[in-house]
Amino acid sequence: MHIVVSGATGFIGRSVVRAALARGHAVSALVRDAAVAKDLLPAGDQNLALVPFGSFAELDAARLRRGDDALIHLAWTGVGKYSDPQNLILNLEPQFLFLKAMMDGGISNITVAGSCLEYGLIEGAVREDACTRPVTYYGLAKHGLCRMLDLLQNPALQLKWLRCFYVYGPGQRPQAVLPQLLAAIRRGDAVFNMSKGEQVRDFIHVDTLAFNTVLAAEVRENLGAVNMGSGKGTRVIDLVNETITAMNAKIGLNPGYYPYPAYEPFAFWADTEKLKATIKGAKFDEKIML
């Protein structure tokens, strides 16, 4: 299969490119800066082509196609700025027009990164058919794009909308709890400031997510929304303590220093039954991987 990957130099994109190459696929990586991409991606791999571009409007499906094509769309402007309305302004129109142009140009096998924040404040194990009530502009923008694609009613569309839960690993944005903890350990800090840590999240390693994302792209069906998580909840305080133990670090904790985020439910995780049923061979982490 030939897979076009947008957002190829991002946190998830880098792992998806490597996973796709490892699965034997040819990859066209859409990149804003070819020089940066050569440092972040295995640019020497003969199955990888870098496709520099300035805007989505420049990209032509006919020029990207090679036959047996799929698109994995990961690009997003403003990742991490969950409460910023620019998520809607900067993403919805250009991304919708790009995805529609790819479909109109004959690339109908499309896998897109959604978000667990589309669900809003639902507690517990969340199924894909749960009522989506996003309370952030990021979640609203992701869900809005998904609904816009649904309304196309293209019978040829093979959409896999992947609602990603809490992805961690190398290259993660530094503001997240694990990168902050690892940075504090490297600095030799005596204490790590954090929330009380009792909130429950579904953590999935970026390489596991990437592998499952490529498997999803290989599915030639319209699956709609699919949860991408571990299927189990982990308290943040347990994640922190496991990391400290794995690193053999000497650092104290100051739980309660930060308040809990108001835009997330206190405890939720992915129901992964649909993932297991529709994406054969999907991996699930047995433990936190550093």
Image (cartoon, helix red, strand yellow):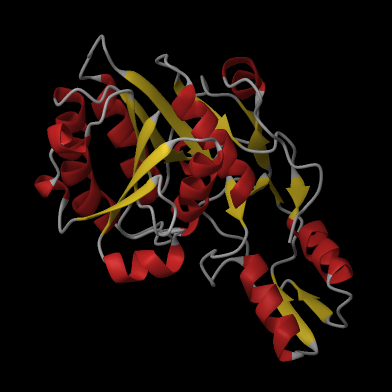
Q: Quadrant of residue 69?
A: top left
Q: Is residue 197 visible?
A: yes
The percent position of residue 53, horizontal first and vertical second, equals 18, 56
What is the quadrant of the C terminus in the image? bottom right
Residue at x 76% of width, y 90% of height: 188
Q: In the picture shown, does residue 184 fall above or below 89?
A: below
Outermost residue toward the top?
155
Which residue is at the front of the view, 12 or 140? 12
Which residue is at the front of the view, 212 or 67? 67
The percent position of residue 99, horizontal first and vertical second, equals 22, 34
Which residue is at the front of the view, 8 or 183? 8
Q: Quadrant of residue 190?
A: bottom right
Q: In the drawing, does residue 3 fall left or right of residue 119?
A: left
Q: How many marks?
A: 0
Q: In the drawing, does residue 46 fall left or right of residue 215?
A: left
Q: Is residue 257 visible?
A: no
Q: Quadrant of residue 215?
A: top right
Q: In the drawing, does residue 55 fall left or right of residue 143?
A: left
Q: In the picture shown, does residue 271 fall above or below 181?
A: above
The percent position of residue 23, horizontal first and vertical second, equals 55, 36
Outermost residue toward the front?
46
Residue at x 38% of width, y 66% of height: 38
Residue at x 65% of width, y 46% of height: 204
What is the quadrant of the N terminus in the image? top left
The percent position of residue 169, horizontal first and vertical second, equals 62, 59
Q: In the drawing, does residue 105 fall left or right of residue 269?
A: left
Residue at x 46% of width, y 48% of height: 17
Q: In the picture shown, does residue 24 fall above or below 39?
A: above
